[in-house]
Image (cartoon, rainbow, N blue to C red):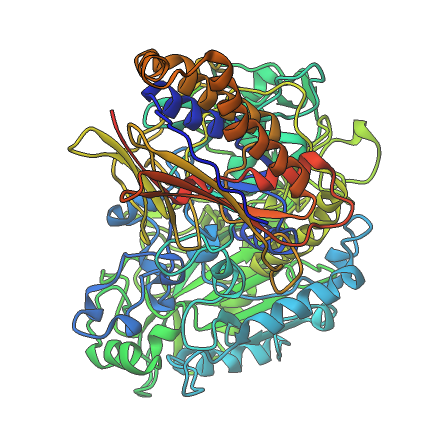
Amino acid sequence: MKIRVLSTLQVSTRTLVLLFLAYIVASQYDAIFVGLGAASSITLTKVAKALPNKKFLAIEYGGPLAKANGGADIPSYFNGVSDAQKLTKFDVPGEYSGIPWNDANAQYRISETGFTWQGKGYGGNSQFNGMLYQEPPSWYLDSLPSGWKTSDLRSTFNDLRSRMTVTPTPSKDGVHYLDGIGQVMANGFRANGQTASDMSNLAPLENLQGFYSAPYVVTDGNGQRGGTVSAFFKDVVGTNGQVLLSNVEIIANTKVNRILFEGSDITVATGVEYQQNGNTLKANLNQGGKIIMGAGALMTPNILYHSGIGPKGTEGNVFVNGRVDFVRNNPGIGVLYDHVGMQTVVEYTGDDQNVNSYNYQSHSDTQGVNNYVNQRTGPYTQYGPVYTSHYKANGAAHPNIELFVSAGGPGGPSQYNTAKSFQAFFMHLNPISNDILRTNGDGSLEAPNLYLTQVADVNDLVDALYQFVNTIVPNSPNLKVTFGPGGIQSQYIDPKDKNSIRNWVTNSGQIDGLATSKFTMNHWTGTVPLRDGDESAGGATPDTLRVRGTSNVHVVDASLLPNSVPCHPIAVVMALGSKGGDILTTMLSANKVQTSSTTRQSTVASTTSSTVQPTSSSSIVVTPTSEPSTTSQAVVTSSTAVPSESDTPTTSQAATSTSQNAATSQNLTQSGSVVTETTDGTPDTNGRFQSNGSGRVYASLGLVILAVFCFEMQLRNSGEISRRKRGNGCSWTSLCVNGITNFVIPMLLYIVSRHRGFTRITVNFDEAQGEHHYEMNHIRALNGRDIYADLADACDFASDRLQMSYQL
């Protein structure tokens, strides 16, 4: 069916603003993700791919890190090679230890957590950590609520392994490098009753006295960092930083201040508030929409606190200053755990030339660097630790101490380190020490006090070090302890006296500026724990991940783990994200997308692949681009003031709107003719509606916009109307008929035909004929969709990929 109608049309600046504002007001989401962490990035990938007709927004404090997502921080040793060979520092496992606590990487650090080093960016800490893959022992998983036990997670872990490579030999040549010190210490491990084992799954090992191996780590199968991004999030954001899914928008380099509850029901979240370019902005949910918290075990509870969610009556303890009342009570939020530990150093005194320390950060091993760049082999395929072991201390029922040995000594060259010095870390796997997470009015967090605050934890580490210096080291040929018992030391420690060792474990934690003890491992958990029970239990519901005290706020990150996981947590954190994706897909698919009865004003900035910028000819131009932009963006802000419970200052880049497909263009000129035509087409390969953009304009707003066009045509241009009346005998009646012909009839056709399935409207300008061409392309409509859902898709003007050129 084709209809062709001609008329004169003039569009004013006001109309253009109304159009743009209408698009912004209508930009509401079925789910808003706060943070794209190691778990939540997986969740977003799964729900967005499973639900193409739902609309998702993600707001991330950082930006792209991996090359797969458009990251651009490329080490200089890649200079001169092809782009295909280049990687970012986050992709290179050997760069892992040089990223934290390095001033050159301050842009990647979360400033609110000054007491520790937490990274930000796509994939979260899966892009910063050592990716030691250890599935937890059964005794731990079986202590979790129903739905999260060993048997419940088996298929999830199997799926993770099918998508990534878990191996002790990440080098493409199958060799484990820097293996000398591990081979020496293996003798001591065996003397201590430990067994060589596959440590990627601890369930079969949990009743042993101990076990050891080279670290099982996650790679992409090509000697590069693997995990969240390589297995999942690469399907959402591509190598140029462009968003690949049309139902996803991402606002990068932006921090969310708080969750908004602006309706009559104080438990129902309506959106989020965030800071961008010094402006306080909002992103709003559709009715039935959900907030998905994925900012990590420190920042997720922090945002919940500032949103008025927490243990009611404890505000004076939680807020050091800038108190917010917990009007949504949740007594489970805020209890913080972390693995704690200490270190010492061992020195090899023998002649074996394979036992040497290694300095990744100096890049002095030019052959090793070249092998990595050209072949993806050698030491740079490994993350740093060269051997790990778990063993029982102080009569524990299960191994409760991890010892892992790094490739070099602490702090680089010093009086304590030689070319054969190796750092040995002792990590308590399941400490009972914990603290309350405290915050300030500006959003910064206070340092927790959870280092060995319980005597039982101290006793465990004392016995662990005692076994090390009296059994493991003496039975490891040509090995001695330095920077502690024996060798050069700042204080005398008697290795046979547990009280002397206790002084070492609990000392000030510094010798000549080098840390010896009081380590926290950045394995934060416990702050929004999974808990069985009713609303009074607090924490999060195991079956829906809902934050109790709210109706539609959910968590998918390490906050859910009730206490410290007795292993490195990245495997179970990724499992949280994957299983959480399945849970939320089911929940979101059951929610019908509806237009809210009250339209809330919002300003939603866009993301990575389309920039809005002023041009020299005083035009507004929206053009697609394949790379992220840091150019100042044109943003229309809401006229409604946003009340603030937080005055957190943030530095953020303006995000730009996302799209995947080729752009259509719309040129709005001073006059011309409109050609409205509809053309039958075919469904996509899945028989589904194929969205051509991310911004949707609802049916009611579409009618308003067309009415504005009609109003502008007939009333705004009074001079043109008068000319017509004088020259052509044009009457108001004929003008009204003309308006009905050009606007009302096409809109009616639009409404009726939508149940056959319009996929998009494209608008082009034919300069030769002075005509605008409106094309409405049909595909088969989905069964069971109501008219509002149909029109929400049909009214997608693909605003983020239109080229709008209008002379102001």
Instruction: From this view, report whether residue 664 is shown above or below residue 229.
Output: above
Instruction: From this view, report whether residue 506 is shown above or below residue 427.
Output: above
Is residue 540 in view? no
Left or right of residue 75: residue 300: right
Frontmost residue, 508 versus 237 = 237
Is residue 624 in view? yes
Frontmost residue, 385 versus 596 = 596
Residue 469 on image: x %, y % = 49, 67
Residue 427 on image: x %, y % = 53, 56
What residue lies at 69% left-to-right and 24% top-to-bottom? 268
Frontmost residue, 460 versus 586 = 586
Left or right of residue 631: residue 8: right
Residue 77 on image: x %, y % = 20, 69
What residue lies at 38% left-to-right and 52% top-to-bottom? 64
Instruction: From this view, report whether residue 534 is shown above or below residue 717.
Output: below
Left or right of residue 720: residue 152: right
Frontmost residue, 283 versus 764 = 764
Q: Quadrant of the C terminus?
A: top left
Instruction: From this view, report whether residue 51 is shown above or below residue 354.
Output: above
What residue lies at 16% left-to-right and 73% top-to-bottom? 80
Residue 386 on image: x %, y % = 43, 73
